Image: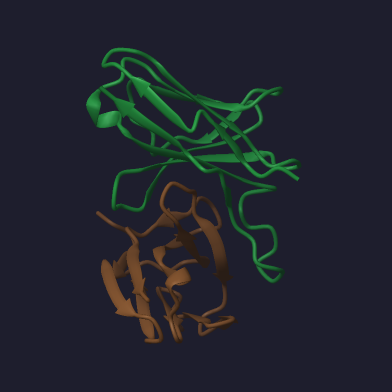
Chain colours: A brown, B green
Amino acid sequence: TQLLEQSPQFLSIQEGENLTVYCNSSSVFSSLQWYRQEPGEGPVLLVTVVTGGEVKKLKRLTFQFGDARKDSSLHITAAQPGDTGLYLCAGAPNFNKFYFGSGTKLNVKP
Amino acid sequence: NAGVMQNPRHLVRRRGQEARLRCSPMKGHSHVYWYRQLPEEGLKFMVYLQKENIIDESGMPKERFSAEFPKEGPSILRIQQVVRGDSAAYFCASSPNRGQANPLGKDYGYTFGSGTRLTVV
């Protein structure tokens, strides 16, 4: 049973398009993180959100934490080939270890 | 300012052999987490350790797997009598505390190593 469900699993778009990736759960999280992983490397932390309804921006990336702290979304504006990678969300139910979603594999074609 | 160092990067073992994976956390980090990742999947929690203590091993298989984080030296994930199903990427992450430095402060979270890719032949 997956604690965190990510959708879509795969996404292939053209450079310049916008996209949104979703991370959903029936559990409440004290905090939720987004990571990006490139082939052959470990995940790299992009952002942490802790407050319900919180929105954080990181250049062309916008992260939102749901009001009930059960879900989150990542929106990328004007995607670039450098955005290609596996995007993982991770949630901590009780300020302890993080559980990871299965990831969204993004391919941005030039 | 080295990050989390894992070695080896690639490890090939025959069925029945032992695999030892090493992880040196970032300087100043005393909390280590091991995760396993199968191709095209997310990371599955295995074990959380502090120096000389196993805090949470709820994700570890009951047999053949063990982990330690001694007072001196790296954390070791040990897999005895490996089987083909053990083939995966094993990632280590570290944090300065329980991964929740300051909920109201700067972004915090894990720093991951580059992983060890174990192949059992």
Does residue A92 appear anywhere in the picture?
Answer: no
Give whichever of B117, A62 is nearer the camera: B117
Estimate the x, y position of residue B28 in percent, counting from the top left.
Answer: 76, 42
Residue A43, relative to residue A65: is it above or below? above
- Vertical order, A36 against B23 (above or below): below
Q: Position of residue A30 (x, y in %)?
A: 52, 66
- Determine whether A76 is above or below A34 in the image: below
Left or right of residue B73, residue B83 in this image: left
Residue at the image point whose x is 36% and y is 23% from the top: B12
Describe residue B10's horizontal placement relative to residue B13 as left or right. right
- Residue B121 seen anywhere in this rendered image of the structure: yes
Q: How many marks?
A: 0
> In percent of the image, x 36 and y 73: which residue is there?
A108
Which one is nearer the viewer's eye here, A79 or A47?
A: A79
* Residue B86 drawn at (x, y percent): 30, 30
Image quarter (top left, top right, bottom left or bottom right) of the N terminus of chain A: bottom left
State the residue in front, A42 or A102.
A42
Q: Is residue A86 left or right of residue A45?
A: left
Q: Quadrant of residue B107?
A: bottom right
Task: Residue at 32% x, 29% y: name it.
Answer: B119
Q: Position of residue B98 (x, y in %)?
A: 62, 49
Say which quadrant the C terminus of chain A sits in.
Answer: bottom left
Residue drawn where x is 37% and y is 81% of the image: A20
Among the 4 quarters of the image, the one containing residue A7: bottom left
Q: Quarter of the image holding residue B106?
A: bottom right
